[in-house]
Amino acid sequence: MSAARPLTTLRTVAVITALPVLLTACGYGSESTDDGKKNAVAAGAEKLSADEVKIGYFPNLTHATALVGVQEGLFQKELGGTTIKTSTFNAGPSEIEALNAGSIDIGWIGPSPAINGYTKSKGKNLRIVGGSASGGVKLVVNPKKIKSLKDVEGKRIATPQLGNTQDVAFLNWAAEQGWKVDAQSGKGDVSVVRTDNKVTPDAFKSGSVDGAWVPEPTASKLVAEGGKVLLDEASLWPGKQFVITNIIVSQKFLKEHPDVVEAVLRGSVKTNEWIDANPDKAKASANEALADLSGKALPADVIDPAWKSITFLDDPLASTLGTEAKHAVTAGLLDQPDLKGIYDLKPLNKVLKAEGKDTVDAAGLGTE
């Protein structure tokens, strides 16, 4: 990669507690450390209205827009003399907490934490300002124990966290099969075992779970351990698309620094365009970023199938967010939310128009 690419200046490791958390519960705490590195800002580059912008995301392939955009300097190019500080998180509630505290200004995050953060603050703390990724979620099972979808009944299936996006999706799918599961305890016709994605491959290998409804690259890690993809969640959605990653921003930061938000969104749009035009280079870039963050790159038998199952896009697929909220309500994990105003897509649509691209719609959940 180019030696001029920006370097992260802050990495935040989320501390995940062992207590189950509902969508309406408090967020996790987080711990941050300054790695002392500075972004490579071009000499003489003009600053925008803020000296710096603090960006948060997960070290996951579903957040590859952020991983690649930072790695390749595509965000920094749009920000000029405004520097980037990056933080990485392992759980959505931690990132929401950081956004609320002002530790980050903009974040890449899944739909359930975004819904949670918006409803908990009564619509005052965040806005979704763009999309980033669709797909990349699969039900992977032990083929010796589960040979068909009906065989899932009575088995132990892992999801990443109580009330997270994949947990809600699995609970909804199980209900559609006619199975009863207590959402909070995970007990019922199927046992839902909330397990951190880092732990799930070992749990699968040891036999303590029979399968998992998980995002990439965890799904492909399970396949590498002998698992079989029984169901790709994309097959359950119209057009095989559903939001897995959004871009959110603090409403305070959006109001005070709209030019910075617009620059980050422009960087995101150009990053997605670069990913689409250079899939192999983009995959390698994302893997390099993951290696920098975790100390270990993903092997080819994991990253290759994982990468193919994710679509990177600018559209937040707003209608699917509304559907996911309904699924959480049905599961008993969320009171009926008022999501009107959760989206502000005006900055993104301004960028898209300038780039000659189609604008996107908030499905009635926008600020106007």
Image: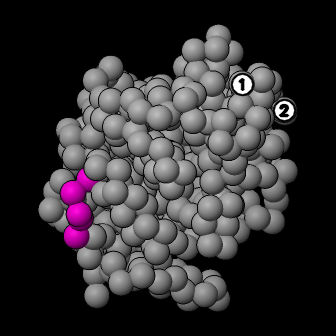
State if disc 1 and disc 2 touch (CB < 8 Å).
no
Give the amino acid type for the residue marked by disc 1 in the picture.
Answer: Lys
Which quadrant holds the N terminus? top right
Find out whether residue 165 is within the magenta segment. Answer: no
Per the image, the residue denoted by label 1 is 145
Q: Residues within 10 Å of mark 2 (few under 14, many from 20)?
A: few
- The main secondary structure of the magenta stretch is loop
Give coordinates of residue 41: x percent, y percent.
53, 51
Q: SS at mark 1? A: loop
Give coordinates of residue 16: x percent, y percent.
35, 25
Nearer the observer, 151 or 306: 151
Which quadrant holds the C terminus? bottom left
Nearer the observer, 236 or 215: 236
Nearer the observer, 324 or 29: 324
Q: Residue furthest top?
A: 206
Identify which residue is drawn at 67% across, 28% down. 291
Q: How is the image coloured?
A: one colour
Identify which residue is drawn at 84% across, 50% down. 280
| Quadrant in the picture for residue 233 | bottom right
Give coordinates of residue 182: x percent, y percent.
34, 37
Give the amino acid type for the residue marked by disc 2 in the picture.
Answer: Asp
| Quadrant in the picture for residue 46 | bottom left
In screen coordinates, is 52 left or right of 336?
Answer: right
Residue 195 vs 136, above or below: the answer is: above
Which segment is the magenta one?
A: 334-338
In screen coordinates, is 294 left or right of 176?
Answer: right
Per the image, the residue denoted by label 2 is 301
Identify which residue is drawn at 35% across, 73% down. 343
